Amino acid sequence: MLTPPTVAVIGGGQLARMMQESAIALGINLRVLVEAEDGATGLVTVDKAVGAPKDLDAVRALIDGADVLTFEHEHIPAQTMEEAARVVSVQPPAPALLYAQDKLQMRARLSEMGIPCPAWARVDNAAELERFGAVIGWPLIVKTPRGGYDGHGVAVAHSPADVESWWGGGSLLAEALVPFTGEVAALLARTPSGEVASWPVASTVQVDGVCAEVTAPAIGIRPETAAEARRIGERIASELGVTGVLAVEMFVVGEGADERVLVNELAMRPHNTGHWTIDGAVTSQFEQHLRAVLDLPLGSTDLRAPDTYSVMVNLLGSAYDQPARALAAAYEAGGDRAKVHLYGKEVRPGRKLGHVTVVDKDPDVALTRARAAVEALHGTSASD
């Protein structure tokens, strides 16, 4: 008797949790290595084990009999990737995932390809950072090449003294502080066979390095700029051999005919900037990721309703121990088009606890309603 396809996933946060929803619809068995039994994914997944990505025994058990191994975060040790690749299809493969794991490798490879990026340099000590700053101008952005996310491992440096404690852990990435007029994200999926499908480019708003709001299709940019962002995303996916979902976060710089994009970050997995696809697109990024890593035909990335905008607002922290107890208030505030997604996570200040999406023909109306619903879940009001 044939068994359903099994997709093994490393990581038990909200991304794997939302993959589970799509796996149920597709009849796919999702087997997840979670950090905690009562974490976001652990609460909703039957086939799971508690362990860390560096635990090779746990990873071996995870991939035993699986059709493919994928990830909900990039923090996967090289040894784990090598061990898994001997046994099972790994998507995205290690040579591609490297460019989402290591920002210095990413910058070097994209620059080699001629992809527009901020001015950057590898710096190994304060003197090298001082020299780069003298050429580019202070302040600079300094990043740890590995391990950073949601603003962690990123600093605005006005002098080398601002990152004095970072030396000794290896090279750092120094970049020009870009005077951007906005930010966008190109989201697409690619199969091992090479099929590519892109969603509309979205505009994004970051607060303290964390994604706060997303609007798709993007607002405030020229159609030519959105088309260029999409082309850049698709080229990166094809030339780097990315499989599954790829998110390319970009800065928008310049005005009018001089408007253009610079690549900021890469993520090779479902991404916060793509949560709008659950309610706004024919195929969500989570369903598409599962289809892509299994090398199945990809689904339509069209908007569910033509000529509409999908606006997603993140719930970052809450005054409530259980935000779901505020659902009635959220729906009253956001209206009947508000779609609430809560992640079952323990409440902590600033933590991503969920999101609200509203689809409307007017992006301002959608944003107002999504914000109101999130404020209700947060236990605040616009005047707080």
Image (cartoon, rainbow, N blue to C red):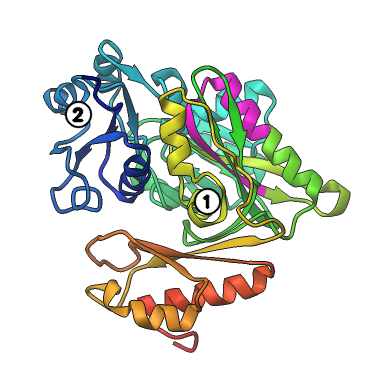
Q: Which residue is mark 2?
A: 54
Quadrant in the rendering for residue 329: bottom left
- Numbered tag placed on residue 277 in the rendering: 1
Residue type pointed to by label 1: Thr
List x then y, in percent, for residue 313: 49, 65
Crowd band around label 2 with a 10 angstrom C-alpha radius: few (<14), some (14–19), many (20+): some
29 up-or-down from 179: above or below: above
Quarter of the image holding residue 53? top left
Q: Is residue 189 left or right of residue 307?
A: left
Residue 270, visible in the rendered structure: no
For residue 148, side relative to residue 131 (left or right): left
Magenta segment range?
A: 232-251
First in sequence, mark 2 or 1: give its number: 2
Of residues 127 and 239, the one nearer the viewer is 239
Q: Is residue 303 visible?
A: yes
Residue drawn at 66 percent across, 68 percent down: 363
- Nearest-to-viewer mark from 2 and 1: 1
Q: Secondary structure at mark 2?
A: loop
Q: Is residue 175 left or right of residue 51?
A: right
Q: Is residue 370 left or right of residue 203?
A: left
